Amino acid sequence: DTEVTQTPKHLVMGMTNKKSLKCEQHMGHRAMYWYKQKAKKPPELMFVYSYEKLSINESVPSRFSPECPNSSLLNLHLHALQPEDSALYLCASSQERSRANTEAFFGQGTRLTVV
Amino acid sequence: GESVGLHLPTLSVQEGDNSIINCAYSNSASDYFIWYKQESGKGPQFIIDIRSNMDKRQGQRVTVLLNKTVKHLSLQIAATQPGDSAVYFCAENTNSNSGYALNFGKGTSLLVTP
């Protein structure tokens, strides 16, 4: 199983809503990532978890709150988002962060629209 | 804010021709590089990787070339097919104080015409 599964595939939310994005992998990977991708742009790193601990937060606003309940699951909690936060949110995983030659596997993404 | 009308660099090739997609990277300390393919509405998909101790690596119909002197990476696709139409990103695995993370280049849109 080389799959990273993200739910939901699409999400429309208002600026006062609270929602969560979910990501799951069963490859035994110990590093998991959230990326944000705007149209016609490359993915931009938001957060990195290594062994269920947050190791990188790329100056992401606090209205995005990541959580790693266990080594297979990664959540992104959303609250009080702005329309400019509308984007494709990608989850990825890799074996470990300390190794250089480590391919990251990506999920299909959640297409988020903030209205 | 985001620029309106920002376009990705686009490469248009005829079916059956070879394609070459180029990428410049900035960090001379980067030691691992990956090419990803992203189709519309999907996540990036691994194509091929290369370590910094190599200058060429071949896969099925794809070849990656690495020139560390000028910090340049290229992806060659042989006998391009309509299914190859997608956006292609190079990514470098760079090491910060807290470990490795993938950073993506700008991307090139490949359009294969029949």
Image (spheres, coloured by chain):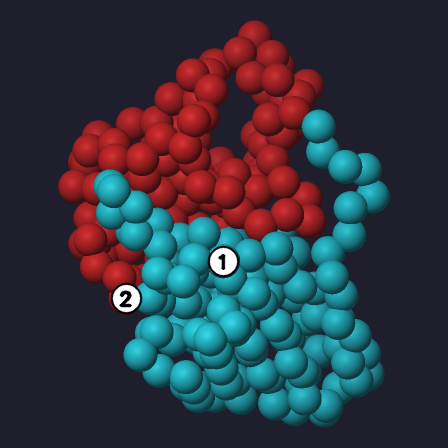
Extreme residue in the top direction: A16
Badge 1 is on which residue? Answer: B26
Residue drawn at point x = 47 percent, y = 20 percent: A61
How far from the left and from the top, in percent, is residue B69?
46, 75
Give the side of residue A102 with respect to residue B60, left or right: left
Q: Quadrant of the N terminus of chain A?
A: bottom left
The answer to whether any part of residue B20 appears in the image is yes
Q: Nearer the viewer, mark 1 or mark 2?
A: 1
User: For residue A95, which numbered disc appears in the image?
Assistant: none
Question: Which chain is red in the rendering?
Answer: A
The image shows residue B63, relative to residue A41, as above or below, that is below
Secondary structure at numbered mark 2: loop
Chain B tint as drawn: cyan
Q: From mark 1 to mark 2, how far is it between C-alphas?
A: 18 Å
The answer to whether any part of residue A73 appears in the image is no
Viewer-closest of A17 and A98: A98
User: For residue A101, which numbered disc appears in the image?
Assistant: 2
Query: Which amino acid does the dot numbered 2 rest on?
Result: Asn
Q: In which quarter of the image is the C terminus of chain A?
A: top right
How far from the left and from the top, in percent, is residue B9?
74, 61
Viewer-closest of B60 and A99: A99
